Structure formats: C-alpha cells, structure tokens
Image (tube, grey):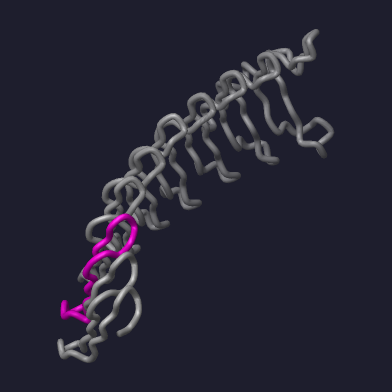
C-alpha cells in the first residue's frame, strides 16, 4: 500500500486545491484536514466533479498513514476500496459498482489472516460466503442466491472438523440436517421442510449408539419419542401429538 501512495502524491501536490465554481460547486482536487490540527494534518484528499466525489480519494489516520483508498464515479463508490489499520495492515478490500457491492469482498483479522469472503452482484449477496477463525481455519461456508442462502451450508469447529450441515432452498432449511461431535462422529440428524422440523430426528452418543429418537410435525414433537443409555438400552418412551404429551 505504501508503494501505491508514493505514486499518488505527486498528482495531489501539483494540483490547485479546494476550488468552488460560479455555481457554488466543488471542483477538482480538494484537501481536508482534521478539525483540531489548524490545517496541518490532512484527513483526506481527492477530487470533486460538480460537487460530487469523482476518482480517487485517500483518507488518513491521525499519524499520517493511509487509512482508506476509495474510488468514486459521480458521487458513488465505484471500483476498489481498501482499508488499512494504523500498523499498515490491510483489513478490508471491497469492490463496488454504481454505489453497491459488486465482486468478492474480503475482510481480515488483526493478525493478517483472512476473516471473511463474500461475493456480491450489483448490491446483492450472490455466490459463496466463507468465514474464518483467527487461526485461518474455515468457520462457515454457504452459498447465496440473491441475498438468500441456497444450497449446502456448513459450519466448522476451530480444527476445521465439520460441526453442522444444512441444506437451503431460497433461504429455507430443507432435507436432512446433520450435527457432529468435534471428533468427527455424527451427533444428530434431522429432517426439515420449509424451515421447520418435519420428520424423524435421531441423536447419537459419540460411540454411534442411538441416544434419542422421535418425530416432528411442523416444528412440534409428534408420535413416539424414546431415549436410550450409552449401551443402547431403552430408558423412556413418550408419545406426543403436535407438541403435547399423550
């Protein structure tokens, strides 16, 4: 980032700044300052066209280091935007088109590892969304279709072992959902329809022996529910009808 700024400074330094035309519109290169600095510490600089930001803008931390690089077209963000912390590390990289997110957006932990990646098309979240732990391991992965989760969604433990898995259809949970122990064994599986539990749910001990089994109807316990000990012996069975014990 410092290399980029080095080539930008001559353009700013040799431009006449802070012009207002006959129509009271800001034009050309402008330099703004932190309010308490008596016009000695620049807070941001960039270009105006007919009173709207247009082209490259650079914003600074109070220590003079670059805080943000932004690109505008007729007052709207258009192109790449990057944000940098006071230690000079990249923390955000975003892409815009006509003021809305467009492209792969990336965000970073303070240790430099990536924190989140999200795909957008013309302002809508569309495509892969991935979130990461500070150690760089994947935490969450899901696909979006026009701002709605659609397709396989997975969550992970910090050792990147699968924790939970859902299937989405236009924002609604459908089909079989799975949960796992951190050691990899299946913990439970459930049937969903239109975002509600509908069908059999089975929970397991880490050994794989069934711990509990029962059914749901429209999100409520329905039919027989039975629990078992770690050896597979039945402990208790209760019958339900639409959430009520019989």
Residue 92 magenta-highlighted: no
In x, y percent, where is residue 104?
40, 36
| Majority secondary structure of magenta residues | strand
Q: Nearer the viewer, residue 88 or 103?
A: 103
Is residue 199 placed above or below 55 in the rendered structure? Answer: below
Examine the rendering and report whether any part of residue 187 can be seen: no
How many numbered circles does the render carry? 0
Name the residue at the right extreme.
38
Residue pictured at 50% horizontal, 41% vertical: 92
Q: Is residue 82 left or right of residue 202?
A: right
Q: Is residue 236 left or right of residue 73?
A: left
Examine the rendering and report whether any part of residue 36 can be seen: yes
Residue pictured at 33% horizontal, 49% vertical: 142
Q: Nearer the viewer, residue 109 or 182?
A: 182
Residue pictured at 35% horizontal, 79% vertical: 244
Q: Is residue 215 left or right of residue 172?
A: left
In x, y percent, where is residue 68?
58, 35
Is residue 75 placed above or below 115 in the rendered structure? Answer: above
Q: Is residue 63 left or right of residue 190?
A: right
In x, y percent, where is residue 172?
34, 52
In x, y percent, where is residue 222?
27, 74
Q: Nearer the viewer, residue 181 or 171?
A: 171
The part of the image, by quadrant, that contains residue 85 is top right
Is residue 70 placed above or below 175 in the rendered structure? Answer: above
Residue pictured at 24% horizontal, 71% vertical: 201
Q: Quadrant for the C terminus, please.
A: bottom left
Q: Nearer the viewer, residue 184 or 58?
A: 184
Residues in magenta, as a range: 191-211
Residue 196 magenta-highlighted: yes
């Amino acid at each position: 980032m410092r290399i980029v700024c080095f080539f930008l400074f001559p353009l700013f330094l040799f431009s006449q700044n802070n012009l207002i035309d006959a129509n009271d519109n800001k034009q050309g290169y402008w330099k703004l300052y932190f309010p308490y600095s008596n016009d000695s510490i620049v807070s941001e600089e960039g270009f105006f066209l007919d009173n709207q930001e247009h082209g490259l803008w650079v914003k600074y931390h109070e220590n003079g280091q670059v805080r943000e690089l932004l690109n505008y077209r007729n007052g709207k963000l258009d192109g790449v935007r990057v944000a940098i912390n006071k230690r000079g590390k990249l923390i955000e990289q975003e892409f815009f088109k006509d003021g809305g997110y467009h492209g792969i957006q990336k965000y970073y932990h303070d240790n430099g590892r990536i924190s989140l990646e999200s795909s957008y098309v013309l302002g809508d979240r569309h495509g892969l969304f991935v979130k990461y732990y500070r150690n760089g391991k994947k935490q969450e992965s899901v696909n979006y279709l026009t701002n709605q989760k659609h397709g396989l969604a997975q969550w992970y433990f910090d050792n990147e072992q699968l924790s939970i898995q859902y299937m989405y259809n236009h924002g609604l949970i459908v089909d079989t959902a799975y949960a796992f122990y951190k050691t990899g064994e299946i913990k439970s599986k459930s049937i969903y329809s239109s975002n509600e539990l509908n069908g059999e749910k089975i929970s397991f001990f880490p050994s794989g022996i069934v711990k509990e089994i029962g059914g749901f109807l429209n999100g409520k316990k329905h039919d027989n529910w039975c629990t078992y000990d770690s050896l597979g012996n039945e402990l208790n069975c209760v019958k339900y009808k639409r959430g009520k014990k019989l």
